[in-house]
Image (cartoon, helix red, strand yellow):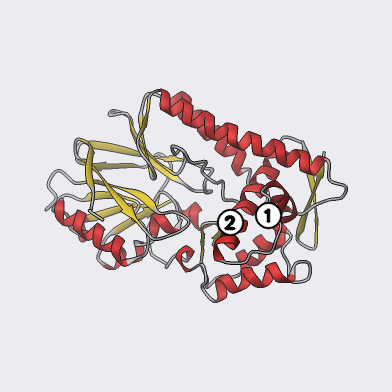
Amino acid sequence: MAKKLTEVCPGIYRLDLESGSKNIAQINIYLIPGRDPETDRSLMIDVGFYDRQCLEDLEWAMEELGLSFDKLDLFLTHKHFDHCGQACVLEARGTRIYMDPAEERHQYDCLHYDRHLHDDQEQVLRYAGITQARTPKLWALFTAAVEEDLLHELNISRFRYLPVEPGQVFCYGPYVLEAVPLPGHTFGQMGLADREHKLFFTADQVIKKIVPIVATSFKDEHLLTKYFRSLESLKTEYGDFCLFPAHNTMLEGEEIVATIDRIAFAYLEKIQIIEQLVRHGRRPMTVVQIAMLAYGVQEIPKDQEQLMFLKMVTSKTFSCLEYLRDEDFVFRTERDGVLYWEAG
């Protein structure tokens, strides 16, 4: 496939990276060269998948723009496999990496894991009602997925980075970019906004034709509540900006409101379904039991693709249940680390 490097604004380039992943096949990488690339530092926003073709495409784009890795700053919006897959490679080449340390809060969610750390996985599965005693087949599948590296594309190699604080400013070329928290898709996701030029790199917060998953499986994080607030802020504070998401195309004008409303409605619709399932249940239910009902999952996953789907919908169901609890529509109890949900 032909490489594609597009100048989306004066001095801002988008590189379209593609991967053979069944889960996420494409991502936009943004590059802002310094005023003098030989002496000034340049910026890359996110870095793509961990595969050879993506690395070759990154190398090609850097050469096309006359940039060097040792004078490059890499801003990682969040710690998912399609955004930071090549981070360890660039670090070895002298690239300086920035990321919100809140992304290290958990080492396991529906779109990434660290296979060297199993405590988070065990806690997440137990919260959801997947334990060796209760659901031995499911437990064995999830354990094997990490121990045998079956979902290897989700595994992120470790890299060193400099911590980013909200409001921190980055300057490249004519652009002055402010780090803006974008909680929801992950706990510590951040974007970069240029208020003078009204540009906002919004990572996975709002995407055309996609409902971003709120990937939490830990209690009391209120992540879906924070996501709704962030979406409202995008409408009211950044409605006249051009939004550059990590997937699909740019958003501006009425598209911003329409896209945000579509995402919010999709979540509210699923929340209503989940509430009804809990309300009409005859007994307290676990997250995975509710997820299987809400998404029509009736059998033990037969392959990696089905296991990945269950992993994602369990996380999304957890987020919806936490939101319903925040709004006093359901309540939860905890027994032996397993969370059970009932109507409020």
* SS of the residue under disc 1: loop
Task: Name the residue at the right extreme.
Answer: 282
Residue displayed at 25% across by 66% down: 93
Q: Is residue 314 left or right of residue 159?
A: right
Q: Mark 2 points at which residue?
A: 309
Q: Position of residue 221 (x, y in %)?
A: 63, 47
Answer above or below: position of 130 versus 179: below
* SS of the residue under disc 2: helix
Q: Is residue 282 left or right of residue 177?
A: right
Q: Position of residue 340 (x, y in %)?
A: 79, 52
Q: Which amino acid does label 1 sit on?
A: Val
Asked whether residue 217 is in view, the answer is no
Which of pointers 1 and 2 lies earlier in the amino acid sequence? 1
**Real-space CA distance between mark 1 and mark 2, rounded to the nearest whole angstrom:** 9 Å
Q: Position of residue 276 (x, y in %)?
A: 77, 38
Is label 1 in contact with label 2 (beta carbons under 8 Å)? yes
Q: In this view, does 55 lie to the left or right of 316?
A: left
Circle 2: is it few (<14), some (14-19), or many (20+) Cα within 10 Å? some
Residue displayed at 33% across by 57% down: 97
Q: Mark 1 points at which residue?
A: 297
Which quadrant holds residue 244? top left
Q: Where is residue 6 in the image (x, y as percent from the top left)?
A: 22, 43
Q: Which of 207 and 309 is in front in this view?
A: 309
Residue displayed at 45% across by 44% down: 204
Answer above or below: position of 340 versus 168: below
Q: Which of 179 and 342 is in front in this view?
A: 342
Asked whether residue 297 is in view, the answer is yes
Which quadrant holds residue 142? bottom right
Q: Is residue 281 left or right of residue 100?
A: right
The nearer-to-camera label among 1 and 2 is 1
Q: Which amino acid does label 2 sit on?
A: Phe
